[in-house]
Image (cartoon, rainbow, N blue to C red):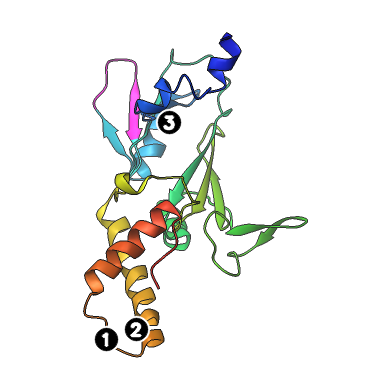
């Protein structure tokens, strides 16, 4: 077997697929560490304990952090672009504006390019907004409530924060209300229905009916 076959993930060499590889840190290039530290602190991101010369912040509910420092990367300041996933893009944008951050209006992709406003059907992945740090590193807010199939394994579903969990419960409650209207009766087994619905959102599986 050639090295190329192995890199392509040949079925006879699946070892890398059986080892968890969780993204921990992304390095962003900044020109002024103190200015960047003030900005990300203002966003409400958690300042983590790190070795000298490294500043690390973690967004609320995120399993991945960002780092910056004077010697961490040779990339030009402002060259980074990353996504921030939110369950409610309007609430997320309002919180950033309240923190004094300049955020674009909410938009969604259209046939000819970005279109102002939320996605009309509020589909996951399509309602967006963006902002930049003082160096020009770009952050794209993206609203996701239901993942594409296979994006997350059912056995690994979790909620990163109380806010995410409460938002998921509210969506499940609304969907369950529609479910009870369809069946014309009170569903006494609502805990199992809620659980199935919330897992389906994260994994992209078919929701319960």
Q: Label 3 belongs to which residue?
A: 35
Q: In terms of secondary structure, where does tag 2 sit?
A: helix
CB atoms of marks 2 and 1 within 8 Å: yes
Residue 185 percent location from the top left of the image: 30, 89
Can residue 167 be seen here? The reply is: no
Can residue 204 be seen here? The reply is: yes
Q: Label 2 belongs to which residue?
A: 180
Q: In terms of secondary structure, where does tag 1 sit?
A: loop
Q: Main secondary structure of the magenta part?
A: loop
User: Which range is magenta?
Assistant: 49-57
Residue 169 percent location from the top left of the image: 30, 66
Quadrant of the rendered image containing residue 15: top left
Q: Label 1 belongs to which residue?
A: 186
Q: Quick check: 3 above or below 147? A: above
Please name the residue shown 58% across and 65% down the image: 118
Residue 107 is one of the magenta-drawn residues: no
């Amino acid at each position: 077997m050639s090295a190329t076959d192995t890199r392509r993930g040949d079925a006879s060499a699946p070892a890398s697929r059986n080892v968890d590889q969780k993204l921990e840190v992304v390095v962003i290039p900044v020109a002024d560490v103190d200015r960047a530290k003030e900005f990300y602190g203002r966003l409400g991101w958690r300042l983590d304990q790190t070795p000298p010369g490294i500043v690390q912040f973690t967004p609320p509910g995120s399993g991945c952090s960002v780092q910056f420092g004077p010697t961490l990367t040779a990339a030009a300041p402002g060259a980074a672009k990353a996504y921030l996933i939110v369950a409610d893009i309007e609430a997320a944008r309002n919180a950033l504006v309240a923190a004094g951050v300049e955020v674009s209006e909410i938009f969604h992709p259209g046939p000819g390019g970005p279109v102002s406003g939320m996605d009309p059907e509020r589909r996951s992945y399509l309602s967006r907004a963006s902002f930049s740090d003082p160096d020009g590193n770009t952050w794209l807010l993206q609203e996701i409530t239901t993942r594409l199939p296979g994006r997350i394994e059912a056995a690994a579903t979790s909620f990163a924060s109380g806010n995410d969990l409460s938002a998921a419960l509210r969506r499940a409650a609304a969907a369950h209300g529609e479910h009870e209207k369809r069946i014309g009766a009170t569903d006494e087994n609502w805990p199992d229905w809620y659980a199935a619905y919330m897992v389906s959102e994260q994994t992209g599986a078919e929701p319960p009916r």
